Image (cartoon, helix red, strand yellow):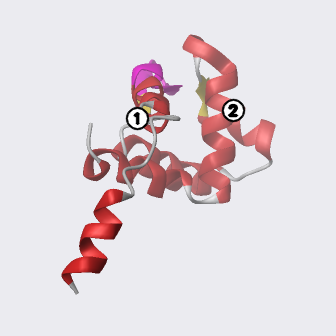
Amino acid sequence: MKEKDIAPAFAALGHEARLKIYRQLVKAGRDGLNIGEIGRLLGLPASTLAHHLGTLVQAGLVTQEKQGRETRNRADFDVMQNIVGFIADECCSGVDLSVLTSAAEAE
């Protein structure tokens, strides 16, 4: 994955309400939650939740499934693992400072 692929997910999570919603969905696991359940847990109105969930869905972090009259919202755990993996992928691999020296010498 590249930064351009991951950036929309981080942008979506950059809002306090969306981060809270996403964390609740992660806590709920594979069963997910409907809008009413999320609203009761977080004290947010349904219209606000629908807006924020739409952003999370568009960023690929949340999936939605119609079940009768309600919509089940679930964290996409594969996407979450990809994001965590992207951040941790080069952990402690070192930084090549020689490029800084080369750039300074070129000036």
Q: Residue furthest bottom?
A: 107
Which quadrant of the view contains residue 17?
Answer: bottom right
At which x and y percent is residue 96? Answer: 36, 51
Tell which circle, 1 or 2, labels the residue nearer the N-terminal end: 2
Indicate the quadrant containing the C terminus: top left, top right, bottom left or bottom right. Answer: bottom left
At which x and y percent is residue 94? Answer: 46, 41
Magenta: main secondary structure equals strand
In the image, residue 52 above or below residue 70: below
Q: Crowding at label 2, few (<14), some or many (≥20) Cα neighbours within 10 Å? A: some
Q: Is residue 26 within the magenta segment?
A: no
Please, what secondary structure does the residue beneath circle 2 have? Answer: helix
At which x and y percent is residue 15? Answer: 60, 60
Out of 30 and 33, give the one closest to the viewer: 30
Q: Is residue 73 within the magenta segment?
A: yes
Please, what secondary structure does the residue beneath circle 1 have? Answer: helix
Residue 24: which disc? 2
In the image, residue 36 above or below residue 19: above
Q: Marks 1 and 2: CB-CB under 8 Å?
A: no
At which x and y percent is residue 29? Answer: 62, 15
Indicate the quadrant containing the N terminus: top left, top right, bottom left or bottom right. Answer: top left
Q: Name the kind of residue labelled 1 in the image.
A: Phe
Q: Residue at x 80, y 48 (%)?
A: 43
Residue 36 in view (yes/no): no
**Horizontal relation, residue 44 to residue 4: left or right:** right
Residue 47 in view (yes/no): yes
Q: Residue at x 40, y 23 (%)?
A: 65
Residue 86: which disc? 1
Which quadrant of the view contains residue 93?
Answer: top left
**Horizontal relation, residue 15 to residue 91: left or right:** right
The magenta-colored residue range is 64-78
Out of 39 and 95, give the one closest to the viewer: 95
